[in-house]
Image: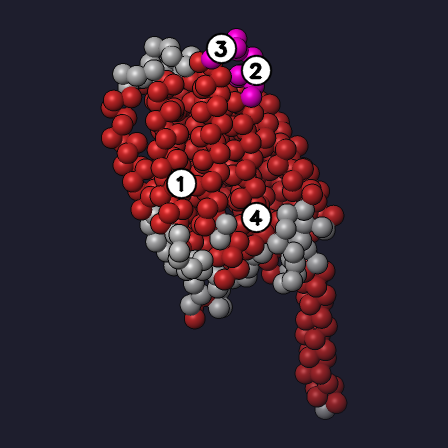
Amino acid sequence: MNRVDATPLVAGSLVARGGRRLTMAAGRGAELLRPPMSSGRATFLELFFDLAFVVALTRVSQRFAGLSDDTGWTLVVGFGRTLLLFLALWLIWSHTAWITSRYEPEQPVIQAVVVGTMFASLIMAVTLPRAMEERALPFAVAYLMVMVVRPLVVAVALRGHPRRLVPFRLVVWALASTPLWLVGALGPDHLRLPLWVVALAVDYLAWTLGWPVPWLGVSKIGRWRIAGTHLADRYQQMFLIALGESILVIGVVFSGADYSAERAAAFAVAFATSALLWRIYFYRAGLLLTEAFRRAGMPGRLGAVSERTHLLIVLSVLVTAVGYELVIDHPFGEPQPSWLLFVVGGPMLFLVARMRLEYEILGQASRSQIIGLAALLLFTPVLTRWAPMVGLSVVAGVLALVALLGALGRRGHPVEVPASPIGRETSGDRDSEA
């Protein structure tokens, strides 16, 4: 009788002991998570990590600049190849930004992850100029080391914490695209581009869908609990890195060219254009990005949308920087069909992305940016017959008009408060995956 009566007590003891073990394991893994009151500022390690992307973005600009003499289908394919490499780099950077917004960057494990990612990113950067040719394999291997090994390290470090399932999902999807990357790198050259396009599409699709895996579920980043202000800080810093790369292009190209009044004028207009891009980005919406994240009930949702916007913004700055190089080298040379893509196309893409950012932060469209975009569209057919210097001057003038109209339109009005229609929490979100 006593033996029978003791059975529930023994079972209860075993359950309680198992529960304590799970709690202890989760507690050890919880050390990696960012505390609620964590600072939103980027760490010095993250700024150090960004140095690898200074090199990478410079190499992307160089590949774009190599297309300046191409036309027709050759230009399209060349642009697509470079765009693919940029998107692979961007996925590495954005994943890292989300990791350091979700996990405590002062933890040794996370620091090791960031440093390892930096080394792999540097390999991708130095192989990028020939990554679609004979250096395809080291580029792909470095990319896969980050996509496969990094989440495994994080999953092991989380131990028994429930969040360990998220990096496991990342590994499953990364392994699904791995054969495409490797076959593309090792196979015939004519198959590399289509295979890598499919592989990168799989990786971006997984990022968008939340890496759904049978029995493990789904983990949409829009529902993640993150340090939103930290993520906003990282987006702003990446924009400044891209802008710094454009300044580097201006200085290097002008210092290496023969000095002349025409080139000096192109140098000045190019610098003014970069300064205007900075002004237009930060004036109001860019400055309010951090506050918008702070007010968002679901900062992950706003972060997911803003990530795509900043992808377009950074790309537009890189493309515009190629236009600077073309104009400073040949300010009054014979216009080529391709230079219009960089001199005018880059700023047009910037205005489109900046309007999108305005909506994400303030829930409204910017009239000044709409006017600027319409003006560039109207001027484009005429600029095909004018020298590159004329095109860049028109772009600078339109951007100056956008900045002026934006400032005048808000004169006398109270300072805006972020009113983002994105990232609002609903009752169904409160029980979402953390």
Q: Is residue 54 above or below residue 325?
A: below
Mark 4 crowdedness (10 Å alpha carbons): few <14, some 14-19, many ≥20: some
Hey, what amino acid is under mark 3? Ser
Hey, what amino acid is under mark 4? Asp
Give the numbered dot on residue 255.
2
Question: Which quadrant of the rendered structure holds the C terminus?
Answer: bottom right
Residue at the outermost bottom position: 1
Give the numbered dot on residue 431.
none
* Pointer 4 or 2: first along the chain: 4
* Pointer 4 or 3: first along the chain: 4
Q: CA distance from mark 1 to mark 2?
A: 29 Å
**Residue marked by disc 4:** 233
At x 37%, y 10%, the residue is 333
Mark 1 crowdedness (10 Å alpha carbons): few <14, some 14-19, many ≥20: many
Q: CA distance from mark 3 to mark 2?
A: 11 Å
Q: Are the residues flagged by discs 4 and 2 in contact, CB closer than 8 Å? A: no
